[in-house]
Structure formats: C-alpha cells, structure tokens
Image: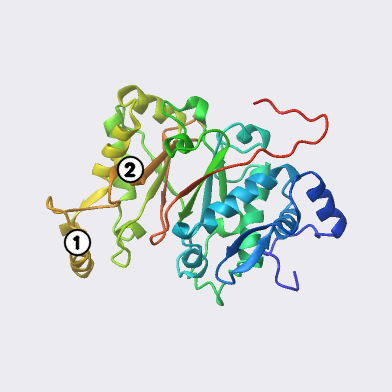
Amino acid sequence: MQQGWGDGLPLIPPTSGRVRAFLARNDRYPDEIIAHLPPTNVELTVEKIVINAVMAGAPPESLELLIAMIVSIADPDFELYGVNATTAPVYPVFVVNGPIRNELDIPFSYGCLGGMANKAAAIGRAVRLIMRNVAGQAPGVTSQTTFGSPGRVAGVVTGEWEERSPWLPLAVRRDIRGDALTSFGAMGTQNIIDTTSHKATDFLEMIGKSVAYAGCNCFSGAVPYGEMLVAINPICAEIVGREMPDISDVQETLWRFASVDACFLQRLHRDQLEQQGRIREDGRVYMTPEPKDILVFVAGGPGGLHATGFHSFGTSLAQTVPVAAAERTEGETHPR
C-alpha cells in the first residue's frame, strides 16, 4: 500500500509462495508477454497478472479469463490510453459467454453487475489493479478523471443469461463461439425501469428514450461516434423476443428511439453536431451510427422489468475475444 500498489481496500500480500502456487495451477510461462498497456506501455507478463490477481483475491482458475480480458482492452480500438487518461469516469465492463460462466461462478442473474459475494468481483478488481499498477492509471497524475466511479475499483464482470435469452449469445453474434468475453468501456450504469409497457415496441421505446439524454457521451460534439451496451432482464427479454425473434429488429427499434430532435439540444451543442454532420435529414441525432452499434444482452434477476444502459467512452469500441481453456488440476472435472 505504501508503494502505491493498492486501491484503498485490503490486499493479499503477493508472496513468492502464493505467486508460485497460482502459476502451478496453470500452463503458462511467467515471463510470457501478454500486452503493453498505456500510458506506461510497460510489458505485462503472466507473472505480473498473477501478482495482481493474488492481491485482489482472484482464484488461480481465472488466469485464462484474466488474460483474455487484458488482450481485449489492449486492442488499439478499445483505446486504453484514452480510457486510462481521460477526464471521464470510464471503466471496463466485461460480458462473459460460454460454460466458463458457471465454472468461475460469474453471475448473470440477481445482482450480476455488483454487490454479490462471488469470484467476479475479485477478477474485475485484478484487472483494475493491473490498470493501476502496470498501465499506470494514477488519478491526478496520468488519469485526469474528474469524479472517478465506483466501477474503478472492481469494474463490472457479468455473464449473459444465455439460457433465458431468445437470441444467440452476444459473443456468438460477434462471431466467437464457446468461452468468450466482450469488453466495453462504460461511462457508468443507467438503470431503466418500466412499470407500464406490455409490448416489445413499448419496452424498447422506454429504454431508447431513457438512454438518449443530451449530456451523454454518444451525443458529445467532441466525438464522431459511439456505441451503446444494453442489458435487459429475462422477463423483458421474453416479452420482446416473442414479438422480435430477430435481434436486428430489436437493435433497429432501440436505435430509432435512442435519438433526439436536434431542436431539443442546446444551441451551441446543436451547432457543433451540425458541423460534424451528425444531424440527419430527418432532423434527428442518433446515439450510434447504425443499429448494429447497440449491443444487447440478457442478464439480471427476473424480479422486475429493469434494463441497464452503458454509454461508451470517446471512440472506444467493444472488443470480443475467445477465452482459452483453463488448465485443470488432476482429478478436477468441469461439465462442458
């Protein structure tokens, strides 16, 4: 903690014994280079990942998931330099698909975005420690985040409730089957509740109009485009899926409602968007360039008609990558 390695919460000392034991459960060389993370661009090795995972309390069997997370945010299109240095409160959200959800106890039902006692929080915290300790994200120094965010402690690690989704899993729709994850640079979470709608279009109208507020990043005159991540709970998904079995229809409907009439915007804001060519012939400004830029997945408890919106940061783009099969200890079996 005195060396600045921590996040303000208690850490497990990364003794050589603990690090060796973690490595022994996996089939990776400790000096294997996984990525160079900005702004420091220091080499991130497997051993450095393990050191931070030990401090965060992440289990040894999570190493391949952690490596996939790092690979995804190290992709140039994720724009990690901007994520780490910005004035915004952005942090990574990871949506996990495949059997690994159950193997690592990644939540996808009640409380899946945080507050549950499971391995996901420690795994997300390990990534955040890596972003701090290796990439060099230091508030007020390399990071100019104005307010920060609770998500900058452990991020968000959630599964998709594939078994309750009427559509293909998010990763499959992004051309990766099996164990996979999608990383998304999120500006925070926005809860949306609908106690009045009964039809698919009505639900999607409520979600679309709720996320389309003037000050969101996707309407910023400082960026030419953005993405949107939307989590809808199983009850809402069931209703929407009955009427819209094709996910592209869901995206199209959300996209249409996630827009504002340019006249609604403050004058200087409107002028800036007009200079960027963001105002379309119908006089509206759309949150994303195309409907496909709204990413939808099913998660959350079935207790109420809630959805959650995540606005993207800057021009950071979501990345979907496969997760390699974890090395199993002798005699350990996991259903596939």
Amino acid type at circle 2 is Lys
**In the rendered image, which quarter contains the C terminus?**
top right
Q: Which mark is residue 277?
A: 1
- Secondary structure, mark 2, is helix
| Label whose residue precedes the other's in the sequence (1 or 2) | 1
Residue at 59 percent of width and 48 percent of height? 68
Q: Position of residue 275 (x, y in %)?
A: 19, 67
Q: Residue 195 occupies which quadrant of the picture?
A: top left
Q: Residue 13 occupies which quadrant of the picture?
A: bottom right
**In the rendered image, which quarter contains the N terminus?**
bottom right
Q: Which mark is residue 292?
A: 2
334 to the left or right of 174: right
Amino acid type at circle 1 is Gly
**Vertical side of 188 occupied by 138: above or below:** below
In this view, the residue farthest toward the bottom is 141
Rate crowding at label 2 as few (under 14), some (14 to 19) or many (20 or more) other CA atoms within 10 Å.
Answer: some
Residue 150 in view (yes/no): no
**Vertical side of 68 occupied by 160: above or below:** above
**Vertical side of 330 occupied by 229: above or below:** below
Is disc 1 in contact with disc 2, using a CB cutoff of under 8 Å? no
Rate crowding at label 1 as few (under 14), some (14 to 19) or many (20 or more) other CA atoms within 10 Å.
Answer: few
Depth check: 333 or 259 in front? 333
- CA gap between label 1 and label 2 equals 20 Å
119 to the left or right of 246: right
Residue at 40 percent of width and 30 percent of height? 236
Q: Position of residue 3 (x, y in %)?
A: 74, 73
Residue 335 in view (yes/no): yes
Residue at 64 percent of width and 32 percent of height? 102
- Secondary structure, mark 1, is loop
